Each structure stands twice: as structure tokens, then as C-alpha cells.
Amino acid sequence: MNFDDDIEKCLAVLKTGGIILYPTDTIWGIGCDATNATAVEKIYEIKRRPENKSLIVLMADQREILKHVSHPDPAIPDYLKTLTKPTTVIYEGAIGLAENLVSQDGSVAIRLVNDIFCRHLIKRFRKPVVSTSANITGEPPPQFFDQVSDEIKEGVDYIVNYRQDDHSPRTPSAIIKWKNGGPELIRE
């Protein structure tokens, strides 16, 4: 489980506005600095994704949410503790993130990660990281590294070696929008 070299190489790429291909607590994803609009634009281009379709932002802990959401409901962390599946929350009032990550209504999709690699990476980077499935828009998201297309691999600046041979079953996160003090299910 030694991934220090991968972390160092990812940090170098992220700090220069590059794109990484990496394992998350759900499926393989491509990511970048969530505060760098130029890097976010590259992800939209790699995926051939319309810019009006939002991307998810990964954070390592609740304090980061307080830096990037103007008024998060204090009930959300307690709700998330009751869930077993990784869940992305759409928060209103995004701040301090690349403008092309924020929806027209000012909301942003954020997931707190439990994956050890992602947590280390985000904590060391000291900024949130974009995460979107490592597939061309419209194609199935890759559960495993060997399902990632060559086109995606060629479009990124660094491919993480850690967990490339892991075939544990994985699925995309659930997505909820927090409205009127409670969750509204967007994706199961």
C-alpha cells in the first residue's frame, strides 16, 4: 500500500494545472485543482462534456466544506454519518472554487472522501480536487483501471499506479441535494 511516489507526482501535476487519472472511494476518476478554471476546462475537453453538466469536488474533511460553501446546513454531517455508500451532496452557496465548477444556481457537488489515497492527496495538496468518472461522456464509467479508455489515459498528465490491479466492485456515488433541511435524492 505504498503510494507516496504517486502522491508526490500527483502534487507536482496538480500544482501546475495538470490532470490526473486516479482511484477514488468510488470509481476511477480524472481530476485537477478545483480552484483552477483552466484545469477544469481541460477536464471538460478530455471528457467531451458540456460545461453545463457539473463535476464533483472531493474534500478531505468537514472544515474544507466550511471554506467553500457559504452556509452549509449543520445537519448534513450527521446525516452523512448514517449512510454506508459514498454520497455526494449538492450544496448551495459555493465560494472559492473555479467558476466553471459552480452551477448557474450557485451550487456545487461535494463529496467527503474516505479513501486513504484520496484523503492523503487532498490533505497534502491543501485544496479540493475535482473528480469525475474517467470516461468520455455517454460511455460507461470505469469501475476498474483496465476499463479506462486509451483516449482518457492519453489525455491526462499523470496516471496513478496505486490500485491499478484492484478489481473490488465499485460504483459511482449517490448524489443528494440538500433542500429545506433534508436530502432530495438525485442519483442512487
Image (cartoon, rainbow, N blue to C red):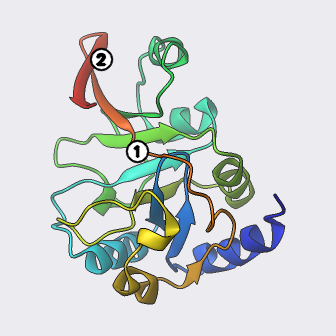
- Above/below status of 62 relative to 119: above
Going by the numbered disc 1, the residue's amino acid type is: Thr
Residue at 32 percent across and 57 percent down: it is 101
| Image position, residue 50 (x, y; %) | 15, 67
Q: What is the secondary structure assignment of the residue under circle 2?
A: strand
- Quarter occupied by residue 130: bottom left
For the image shown, how many numbered marks are present on the structure?
A: 2
Q: Residue at x 48, y 72 (%)?
A: 146
**Are the residues at dot 2 and dot 1 in contact (C-beta closer than 8 Å)?**
no
Q: What residue sits 21% from the left and 67% below the top?
A: 137
Q: Earlier in the sequence, mark 2 or mark 1?
A: 1
The residue under label 2 is 183
State the CA–CA distance, disc 2 to disc 1. Answer: 20 Å
Mark number, residue 110: none
In this orientation, which residue lies closer to the viewer: 18 or 93? 18
Image point (71%, 47%), residue name: 116
| Residue 135 in which image quadrant | bottom left
**How packed is label 2: few (under 14 Cα within 10 Å), some, or many (20 or more)?**
some
- Examine the rendered structure and indicate whether residue 158 appears above or below residue 1: below
Q: Residue under circle 1?
A: 171
